[in-house]
Image: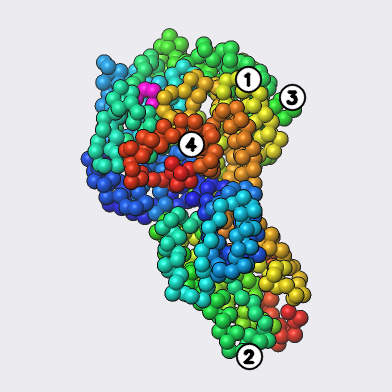
Amino acid sequence: MINALGQPQTVLLLGGTSDIAQAIVAAWAETCRPHVVLAARPGPRRDEAAALVSALGLPVEVVDFDAERTDEHPGLIDALAAERDIDVAVVAFGLLGDEEQAWQDHEAAVALARVNYVGAVSVGVCLAEVMRRQGHGVVVALSSVAGERVRRSNFVYGSTKAGMDGFYLGLGEALRGSGASVLVVRPGFVRTKMTQGRSPAPLSVTAEQVADAVVKGVARRDDLVWVPTALRGVMSGLRHVPRPLFRRLPL
Amino acid sequence: MSESRELTGWGRTAPTVATTVRSDADGVPELVRRAGPRGLVARGLGRSYGDPAQNAGGSVLLPVPGPVEVDAAAGVVRAAAGTSLHELMVELLPRGLFLPVTPGTRYVSVGGAIACDVHGKSHHVAGSFGQHVVSLELVTADGATHTIGPDREPELFWATVGGMGLTGVITSAVLRTIPVETSSMSVTTTRLPDLDAAMAAMRSTDAGFTYSVAWIDTLARGRSLGRSVLSQGEHATRDELAGRAGRHPLLPPGSPRLAAPPHLPGGLVRRATVRAFNEAWFRKAPRHRSGEIQSVSSFFHPLDGVAAWNRLYGPRGFVQYQCVVPDDAEETMSRIVERISGQGHASFLSVLKRFGSGNPGPLSFPMAGWTLALDLPAHPDLATLLEELDELVVAVGGRVYLAKDARLGAARLREMYPRLDDFLDVRRRVDPARVFQSDLSRRLEL
């Protein structure tokens, strides 16, 4: 259960090796001691991530999960929910890819779409099903401002995030009254291993700042948070910039 | 008749959705037998602050008021579990009878009062609610109805008293009453400049009163730390009532005249407003006054005058922290008050009371010592403060009250309730398949 102060007992990390997912459990480790289910592809990155969670003093359980193998998702999530309630599920997996390659290389483009959009929709439907049955639970969907107004420089990634963002906002509406809810998180540029080597955009944030926003958002039962919050204003301005001008902005 | 509903406790935090069902006592066994994998829990009037009467994804049995049968000669009353204490008092007071234990609100059900083993201002004399139950009917997980009491299946009875609804569904109870000459109270009020004075006054004068509680200003600091207004009373005799009141000495309690409007914004209860309120409340109290005549409602249930006052805390709701520490842990109590005033978390109408001894209920809250109750606006940052308070409380063998709690974890519960295993043994015996479940039982692994 999530208690009155927004502290969960169980957190499922889908894409548990992501820096943001790690930062989220680290933030909760300071105030409550949730049981962590770390779902990711087997390998040294997962082992390392599990070791980090253990080092926080949290009980951790590791399960095999591949965002692209959508046919396995219903069985996996059902089995996890049968064992214990899923209080919070973080949809943290995603590919960034090389943008210029992504729109010209068929395989790379399809992989991005399959992981970031199809995979996200797949787990979203499964999570909604078990959380409706539970009568409670929060799906935290890590979206991105890149999906708010898709821009030339990373439109393949941006379009997948636009899709998943729209899906999860809609899912949140559909789940109203069921006890389950969705928190869509729209960070700006996050300095993590996924973005390593790229020059940070203005208003860039750390994984810890995103984690902090998630922890607060869950406690407040929010359905949408921007990190940093100033991005909301910036993006609502950018959304209305005419295309010929938008094209020339250094974004 | 069932309906999917979002439910919270009185604190309006942590909403979850359950299937609500209504039934009188005859239909309960069938509902219990038909409960799904996420089980069932009985709900009273939703006055527990946290989650004991919620059952996410399962069933919640709503209260149905039933007949109230008063046996004035024997001084007992039989009531359906869904009856509120208000309804009970409406029947009892005109007959010159009263309940020996009444909590801070009349709007709790008989079943809920037993399942939470509620207490009131009379605890130091009368103990808690469960100690005045002659017998009760309990529908257990197998659908069987047991009539239990302190002398019939005492183990199951005492696990049910304070058992948060997890041993079964209470459908009715026979309660002891006390005779009263009037429906008024004769009240002594004393203003005390700090916590030490308040505790000393309760130690030395409580024995002379059936009812006693102190309102404490948890925002005052320094020399005024823990300044209090002590309110003590007795049922007024006919002789004490003058004039008109004397001609109608036994009146039933009234219904609320005011209601907090829905959809109030958050932030009304904050440091500045609470400080102003506390200051006014303290100053308006007389230094010392005795023999003041008050109604039962204004003495026992001042907040019942405003319906849905919990809305004042806005959409995020609030939590109540109520702890008890042993009699000799006065030092800890002052450290707790110091921590709270130091943090400046706004709690208005905090109350301090000296308890008498506890009872055999393994999950019953009261124990001989000092209890403090605080209402605090829910905020994620509150977690740290409350954990620090838990730490102080546990260190001296104290505990928090499950009827108020909405945030404790299973490990802490075990430290606070040394007889937890006695409770769990009974629960495993009478409900091996865990038919009775609630959000609280999942949170605390009960």
Cα distance in 3D space between marks 3 and 4: 33 Å
From the viewer's perspective, is B259 left or right of A43?
left
Residue B131: within the magenta? yes
Q: Which residues are magenta?
A: B130-135
Q: Amino acid at mark 4?
A: Leu
- Asked if badges 3 and 2 are on one and the same chain, I answer no
- The chain that hosts pointer 4 is B
Percent from the top left, x then y, of residue B372? 57, 29
- Asked if badges 4 and 1 are on one and the same chain, I answer yes
Q: B325 or A242: nearer the eye? A: B325
Q: Amino acid at mark 1?
A: Ala
Secondary structure, mark 4, is: loop
- The chain that hosts pointer 1 is B
Residue B198 is marked as: 1
| Residue occupied by mark 2 | A104
Q: Are marks 2 and 4 in contact (CB under 8 Å)?
A: no
Q: Quadrant of residue A22?
A: bottom right
N-terminal label among 3 and 4: 3
